[in-house]
Amino acid sequence: MLYSEKVLDHFSNPRNVGEIEDADGVGEIGNAKCGDIMKMYLKIDDDGIITDAKFKTFGCGAAVATSSMATELIKGKSIDDALKLTNKAVVEALDGLPAVKIHCSVLAEQAVRCALSDYYTRKGIDPLPIVGEIHEPEE
Amino acid sequence: MDKRFIYADNAATTQVSEEVLNAMLPYFRTAYGNPSSIYKLGRDAQRDVEAARAKVAKALGADPSEIFFTSCGTESDNWAIKGTAERMAKKGKKHIITSVFEHHAVIHTCEDLEKKGFEVTYIPVSDKGLIDPEDVRRAIREDTALVSIMYANNEIGTIQPIPEIAAICKEKKVLFHTDAVQAVGHVEIDVKAQNIDMLSLSGHKIHAQKGIGVLYVRKGVVLPNFIHGGGQERAKRAGTENVPAIVGLGVAIENAVKNIGEKAAVITPRRNRLIDGLLEIPYTRLNGDRDKRLPGNLNISFEGLEGESLLLMLDMNGICGSSGSACTSGSLDPSHVLLSIGLKHEVAHGSLRLSIEEDVSDEDVDYILEVVPRVVERLRSMSPVWEKMMKGESYE
């Protein structure tokens, strides 16, 4: 498996690993059967700025690295910006991923949306029109 | 930080030994003749190829005329299975018996034959990773063309009761092939005494180079020609001989089969110490029978983590191992071997295979036992699956 230096860096020194006790939005995606689960915690202030993001991941090197990079890319950003995060942006920020690992970046993108969806649900707002559908990976 | 390098993946490939390399070197620049050429340079090459063939034959208890050089173990498997299928189909025999946990070289070849109208029975294995010879007996039919069962499993190292299975095949007058790629050099093999009709082996698993394999075909078993061309390998497997690799294999197999018992006496206690030490980590299981396994093999599943991450972290600590996780197989499914012995997908994803030889010292074992628990703990601490397990929740 040919991983970029950046992937290996984010794998061996993952940024933002852990939990947020009083998170405003928590999202979990994937399943253990397929070998990847990402759980994302977001802290969002009254202005809709993501002040903190943390993750826990069960998965391969790419799964850990994409989780780490996704949290880095949305920290300090507005919800609107976070919703614009694409898997492609995660892949590019990591200097590429092997073709068989692209699904990990999709999972990272969906984990962010999943956590944002939870944020809106907690506020009593229907997340579907804002966040859109969350795509669970196929078994 | 202790900067070690521990190669514990000999089931994947081995280092070419110095003795093998030295034996090969003259054949690149000095003794580079084509064995088919008439002049001395060619004749010498032919003589040395035949000497290597005799060494391989001796190591297996075979006759040199029963040894065919191929490019790898996979090619040998393909030839044995497809060749037998083709020949036996003409006699109306289109049924093949193999096991669920064969190497892909066998499984995918059988699946291809299924598409071509053959029927294949995949014998199940026990939760210990062992085949019951009686299951093979029960599966044999009037139209069975071939039984192909691996000698030792490549992932969990379990050694199959090959002499028993082969004896049943002989009694039932069905041809028997074994993929012995993992077994050669670790298990005593005698094709005559053990009634083996065909056997595949690979050079690079026994300290020869990659790109050389052998198919043993018992005298009297007729296989169709596999590669058409010149008269090499008695025209059955044409193509100019890979002389350096063949010579190297001769040396390698001679070394591999000598002192099998002494080697095992050194490796087994170290391997057992690894097993016992790693099983002290909670939520961990040994895959495959503890005793009926290759001396250097261990395969352990750690719940709550994923194998590729584990391998990458071990690599960062200078330890080379392998895993049956989906991520290392390039598909979403974990190893078919681990699933075949009843592991759930999520447990199979977190497996680690180490395959050691004598060069892995007692100090190396200590080091592995120091590193692995640390890495397992780190990966579990960032795993949502582990978190759920600890809370007693289901993660399925």
Image: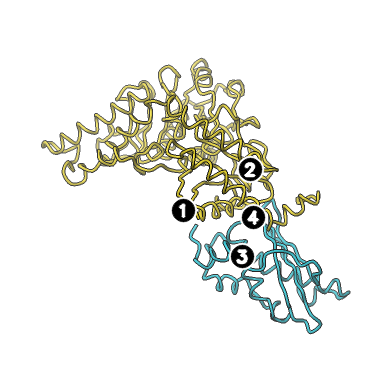
Give the letter of the chain under mark 2.
B
- What amino acid type should be assigned to the residue bearing mark 1? Lys
**What is the CA distance from the residue labelled 4 to the residue labelled 3?**
12 Å
Q: Nearer the viewer, mark 1 or mark 2?
A: 1
Chain with yellow colouring: B
Q: Can residue B103 be spotted in the picture? A: yes
Mark 1 packing: few (<14 Cα in 10 Å), some, or many (20+)? few
Image-based side of B330 in relation to A125, left or right:
left
**What is the CA distance from the residue labelled 4 to the residue labelled 2?**
16 Å
- What amino acid type should be assigned to the residue bearing mark 3? Pro
Q: Nearer the viewer, residue B352 or A132?
A: B352
Q: Is residue A77 above or below residue B78?
A: below
Q: Are the residues under marks 3 and 1 on the same chain?
A: no
The percent coordinates of residue A64 (x first, y second) are: 62, 62
Q: Nearer the viewer, mark 3 or mark 1?
A: 1
The percent coordinates of residue B29 (x first, y second) are: 18, 46
Image-based side of A121 in relation to B252, left or right:
right
Image-based side of A67 in relation to B219, left or right:
right
The numbered mark at residue B378 is: 4
Q: Is residue B148 above or below residue B70?
A: above
Residue placed at 51% from the left, 53% from the top? B317
Q: Secondary structure at mark 1?
A: loop
Q: Which residue is mark 1?
A: B3
Q: Secondary structure at mark 2?
A: strand
**What is the CA distance from the residue labelled 3 to the residue labelled 1?**
22 Å
The numbered mark at residue B301 is: 2
Q: Nearer the viewer, residue B264 or B350?
A: B264
Q: Can residue B222 be spotted in the picture? A: no
The numbered mark at residue A14 is: 3
